Structures are given as C-alpha cells and as structure tokens.
Amino acid sequence: MATKDLKTYSLAEMKDKYIGKVGTANRDEYEYELRMDVLGKMIKSARQQRNLTQEELGKLVGVQKAQISKLENSTNSATIETVLKVFGALRAEINFNVKLEDTFVKLA
C-alpha cells in the first residue's frame, strides 16, 4: 500500500484561499470580527477579575446588562467611546497602537 504525500499549508495560505486575500472585503470583515471577538473576551476576563457581574458593570458604565453581554459575546459593534467607558469602569488600562507597514505611529 503506497502512502500519499500530503501537502501542508500555512494559516496565512488557508486564509488567503478560503477567506480572501488581505485587503479584500471578505478578509477585512473576517479580521474585524476576529478583533471584536478578542476584545469581547478581554472585557469579560477583566470584569471577572474585578468580581463584577454583567449587571454591576453595566451600572458602572451606564448601560443595561444586555449591552455588556453583547460586548462580551461580540454580537454588537461597539464604539470606541463605549469600549473606553467599559475599561474605565473596570479601572483597566487599554492601549491602541497604529502601525504603518513596520513602524508604529507616534503622537507628536
């Protein structure tokens, strides 16, 4: 019985093939949703470390429990203002970086 040689692909190659190349609408949407998912997990983790319920965090931020749940489950697009309010209520520092090619943009 002959064994077949299997070709292997990198994650980047698989994304390019099945989602779309970088810069295409499908790829941009995928990358955005992935970032929102990570952000939601970060909010949930920080909330749990502060021993707060979704309802308690919502009261600190001035929103309903349902909005906190949506943020944590990435089912809702959040404005930067809302994200900053949430992390502020959690007394957590959040950093944003802008990178152009291989260089981070620095404020003057």
Image (cartoon, rainbow, N blue to C red):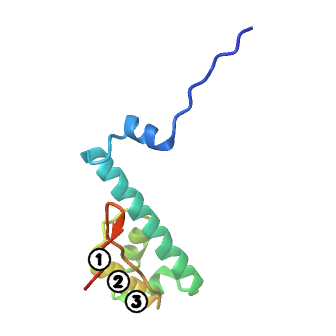
**Mark 2 Cα-neighbour bin, 10 Å: few <14, some 14–19, many ≥20:** some
**Marks 1 and 3: CB-CB under 8 Å?**
no
Vertical order, 71 against 95 (above or below): above
Camera-side residue of 3 and 50: 3
Cα–Cα span, label 1 and label 3: 12 Å
User: Is disc 2 in contact with disc 1, using a CB cutoff of under 8 Å?
Assistant: yes
Q: Which mark is residue 65?
A: none
Q: Is residue 107 above or below residue 19?
A: below
Residue 67 image-quadrant placement: bottom left
Secondary structure of the residue carrying tag 3 is helix
- Identify which amino acid the numbered label 2 is placed on: Leu
Q: Is tag 1's residue or tag 3's residue first in the polypeptide sequence? A: 1
Quadrant where the N terminus lies? top right
Residue closest to the eye, 22 or 52: 22
Per the image, label 1 sits on a secondary structure element best described as: helix
Q: Nearer the viewer, residue 92 or 76?
A: 92
Question: Residue at coordinates 47% horizontally, 91% vertically from top-left?
Answer: 91
Residue 5 percent across, percent down from the top left = 63, 20
The quadrant the C terminus occupies is bottom left
- In the rendered image, the vertical position of residue 69 relative to residue 57, given as above or below: above
The residue singled out by tag 3 in the image is: 88
Q: Secondary structure at mark 2?
A: helix
Would you name the residue on which mark 1 appears?
80
- Residue pointed to by mark 2: 84
How dense is the environment of label 3, judged by Cα within 10 Å: few (below 14), some, or many (20 and up)?
some
Q: Report which quarter residue 7 is drawn in.
A: top right
